[in-house]
């Protein structure tokens, strides 16, 4: 089953710590700030601040667009600097403080329950990868180019800027092909049920 998720249907939600808002793209189930097995969202980060806690979850965060990047201070270890389309993974209960390199940024987040799912996230921003095979239980493709032509086992979907495709799989190996435009830019997330 292939579902295209439109930007106007993304849900605006407050951060758990109340310091900003998240635009939730899609989640496994539930409606609250912690009753889900996985959730994908984007958020505008306008100033330095602490991250919300998500106990018993893993987080992968990256810089989608905006300023030069973000510095993450995680559990008092060496700071991690993220520029556009770079990602970092950490535990949801980690003590995280973020600082902007210059201007505000928009980040991209995957939060998931590692006891229920394995996750793989890749940012594809060239023609280096135009097709792949996946037997993941859920495949999410977040489009960051004007238009992305996606084929899943020959079935076509067209994604405009910031639209998302959710593919729910029942254990088959599916072939994914990106149409033959000159450039593409998208995030590929694969979720595997444990």
Image (cartoon, grey):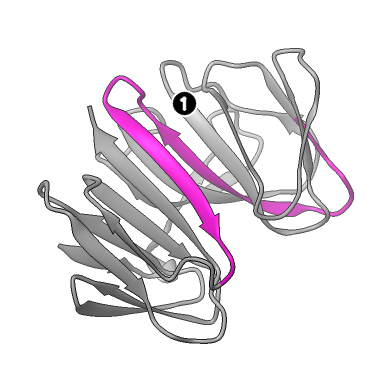
- Examine the residues drawn in magenta and state their main secondary structure: strand
Q: Secondary structure at mark 1?
A: strand
Q: Is residue 148 above or below residue 133?
A: below
Quarter containing the N terminus = bottom left
Q: Is residue 25 above or below residue 87?
A: below
Residue 159 lies in magenta, yes or no?
A: no
Quarter containing the C terminus = top left
Which quadrant holds residue 27?
top left
Residue 108 lies in magenta, yes or no?
A: yes
| Labels in figure, total | 1
> What residue range appears in magenta?
98-126
* Residue 194 shows in the view: yes
Q: Position of residue 20 (x, y in %)?
A: 64, 42
Q: Position of residue 142 (x, y in %)?
A: 45, 62
At a point 49% along the width and 87% down the height, the residue shown is 181
Where is mark 1, residue-wise? 58
Q: Is residue 146 above or below residue 33?
A: below
Q: Residue furthest top?
A: 76
At a point 53% along the width and 30% down the height, the residue shown is 16
Which quadrant holds residue 123?
bottom right
């Amino acid at each position: 089953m292939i579902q295209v998720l439109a930007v106007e249907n993304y849900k605006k939600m407050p951060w758990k710590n109340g310091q900003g808002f998240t635009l939730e793209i899609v989640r496994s189930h539930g409606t609250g700030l912690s009753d889900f097995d996985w959730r994908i969202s984007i958020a505008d980060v306008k100033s330095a601040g602490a991250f919300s806690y998500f106990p018993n979850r893993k987080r992968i965060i990256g810089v989608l667009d905006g300023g030069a990047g973000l510095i993450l201070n995680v559990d008092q270890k060496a700071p991690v600097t993220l520029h556009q389309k770079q990602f970092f993974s950490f535990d949801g209960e980690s003590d995280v403080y973020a600082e902007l390199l210059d201007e505000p940024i928009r980040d991209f987040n995957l939060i998931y329950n590692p006891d229920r799912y394995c996750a793989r996230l890749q940012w594809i921003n060239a023609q280096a990868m135009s097709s792949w095979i996946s037997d993941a239980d859920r495949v999410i493709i977040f489009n960051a180019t004007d238009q992305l032509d996606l084929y899943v086992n020959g079935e076509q979907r067209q994604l405009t800027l910031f639209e998302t495709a959710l593919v729910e799989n029942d254990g088959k190996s599916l072939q994914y092909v990106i149409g033959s435009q000159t450039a593409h830019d998208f995030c590929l997330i694969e979720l595997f049920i444990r």
